Image (cartoon, rainbow, N blue to C red):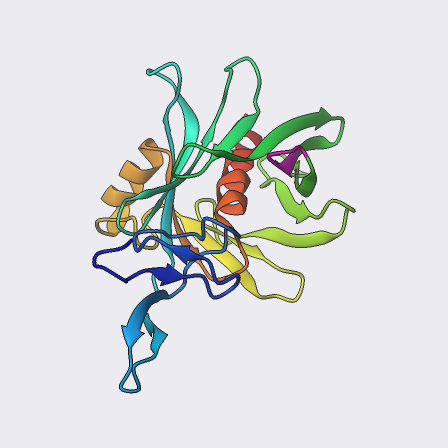
């Protein structure tokens, strides 16, 4: 476990022990906004010691089953380590299976096309729907699509708010931000400026700043898989 004997990272939500490199808890899926390590105090009792958190991720399209096509959605943490992958089992269907770092399927993203737009149902590995991403075309020609997230009962959990044509926020109804996304934003960028932005756009890469501790790796990966299909038909 981790980098030394007796050292591990504990989830502050469910208490599960995880390997040091983990960005999301392998049990409950919550992100590690701080790294907890086992530390022996002066009284001889081991307690969790929190060090500086990391909340930066990158999301990009990567080669899938057909190596020349970008069909999978890969999420990496700030160090470049893959934390989740959304794979398209078939290019004939715009659905995804989301896998964790061990290749285990932890959720599904299924597209539903209807007259008003697209819906993307996010379900657990057993098919139980817990999130639905709704995407509607802009009302006017050239207008940005409207996007929001619902729970399984149709209640709005978050909306997509555009900063400009390249950058956007995912925001809860109370105004609190879940994440910010854009090319050359956050930990995945090697430098700012128009050059890096163009490189990120060409690679279909977004850099993410994650603010909401309850947002899981599956939700992050599934959301961007839906946005990739829904915003880029």
87 horizontally vs 79: left or right: right
Farthest-out residue, front: 44
Instruction: Give the total of numbered labels.
Output: 0
Q: Residue at x 63, y 29 (%)?
A: 110
116 horizontally vs 15: left or right: right
187 horizontally vs 225: left or right: left
Q: Is residue 208 above or below residue 13?
A: above
As for residue 215 lying within the magenta part, the answer is no
Q: Residue at x 61, y 40 (%)?
A: 145
As for residue 122 lying within the magenta part, the answer is yes
Q: Residue at x 78, y 47 (%)?
A: 153
Q: Is residue 94 above or below residue 73?
A: above
Observer-nearest of 146 and 84: 84
Q: Is residue 129 above or below residue 190?
A: above
Residues in magenta, as a range: 120-127
Observer-nearest of 96 and 146: 96
- Image coordinates of residue 23 in percent, x first then y, are 38, 52
Farthest-out residue, bottom: 43
- Image coordinates of residue 151 in percent, x first then y, are 71, 48
Is residue 206 among the parts visible in the rendering?
no
Is residue 230 among the parts visible in the rendering?
yes
- Image coordinates of residue 189 in percent, x first then y, are 27, 49
Main secondary structure found in the magenta portion: strand
- Image coordinates of residue 152 in percent, x first then y, are 74, 44
Q: Quadrant of the C terminus?
A: top right
Q: Residue at x 30, y 52 (%)?
A: 21
On the image, which quarter does residue 8 sit in? bottom left
């Amino acid at each position: 476990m981790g980098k030394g004997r007796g050292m591990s990272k504990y989830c502050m939500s469910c208490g599960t022990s995880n390997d040091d490199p983990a960005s999301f808890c392998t049990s409950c899926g919550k992100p590690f906004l701080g790294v907890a390590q086992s530390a022996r105090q002066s009284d001889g009792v081991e307690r969790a010691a929190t060090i500086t958190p990391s909340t930066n991720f990158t999301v990009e399209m990567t080669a899938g089953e057909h190596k020349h096509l970008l069909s999978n959605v890969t999420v990496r943490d700030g160090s470049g380590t893959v934390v989740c992958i959304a794979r398209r089992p078939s290019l004939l269907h715009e659905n995804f299976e989301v896998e964790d770092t061990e290749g285990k399927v932890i959720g599904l993203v299924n597209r539903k096309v209807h007259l008003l737009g697209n819906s993307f149902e996010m379900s657990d590995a057993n098919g139980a729907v817990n999130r639905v991403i709704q995407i509607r075309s802009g009302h006017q020609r050239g207008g940005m699509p409207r996007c929001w997230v619902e729970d399984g009962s149709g209640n709005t959990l978050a909306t997509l708010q555009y900063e400009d044509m390249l950058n956007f926020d995912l925001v809860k109804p109370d105004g609190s931000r879940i994440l910010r996304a854009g090319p050359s934003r956050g930990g995945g960028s090697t430098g700012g400026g128009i050059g890096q932005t163009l490189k990120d756009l060409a690679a279909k890469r977004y850099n993410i700043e994650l603010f909401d501790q309850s947002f899981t790796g599956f939700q992050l990966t599934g959301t961007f898989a839906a946005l990739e299909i829904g915003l880029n038909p």
